[in-house]
Image (tube, rainbow, N blue to C red):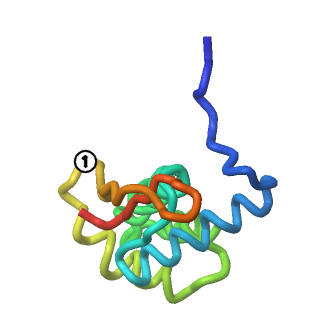
Amino acid sequence: MKHQSGKRKLNLKSAHRKAFLRNQVIHLITYGHIVSTKANVKETQKLAEKLVTVARKGASDFNARRKAKSMLPYKEDALIKLFKEVAPRYIERPGGYTRVIPMGKRMSDTATIARLEWV
């Protein structure tokens, strides 16, 4: 059985979800952390880890830059920071570039809040 093996839909249409996750990853790369609901953070974590894995071989591989550009097409500054600052820190690390820190519940709607940051 393949129960719950897909993506979280986050109550968004696919194009909106894709843009939302890209923006979250851009914010994570730019500022080093994001604070959002746990479901949003976990989906963002998936995309961010894939991007760092691609970017780790980016200095020598032009196709890695093209792949990362296709995943984050509209923010060149974030891509440059990803390849110059973020990815070189994790060259020796086999995975697990981010951590999720639970921050309790939000007062208004009791949604579980979490913080995503680089390890």
Crowding at mark 1 (Cα within 10 Å: few <14, some 14-19, many 20+): few
**Residue 42 appears in the picture as rendered:** yes
Residue 56 x, y percent position in the rendering: 35, 63
Locate residue 21 relative to residue 61 in the image: left or right. right
SS for dot 1: loop
Reply above or below: 30 against 14: below
Residue 87 x, y percent position in the rendering: 32, 69
Locate residue 99 relative to residue 109 in the image: left or right. left
Locate the N terminus by quadrant: top right
**Residue 100 appears in the picture as rendered:** no
Quarter residue 105 falls in: bottom left
Q: Amino acid at mark 1?
A: Pro
Quarter residue 22 falls in: bottom right
Quarter residue 109 falls in: bottom right
Tell me the residue at 25%/48% (across/down). Answer: 94
Q: Residue furthest top?
A: 1
Number of dots carrying numbers: 1
Reply above or below: 51 against 31: above
Locate residue 71 relative to residue 41 in the image: left or right. right
- The residue singled out by tag 1 in the image is 94
Locate the C terminus by quadrant: bottom left
Q: Which is nearer the eye, 8 or 56?
A: 8
Tell me the residue at 52%/76% (across/down). Answer: 26
Q: Which is nearer the eye, 36 or 116?
A: 36
Q: Residue furthest bottom?
A: 77
Q: Residue furthest left?
A: 92
Residue 6 x, y percent position in the rendering: 63, 34
Reply above or below: 24 against 105: below
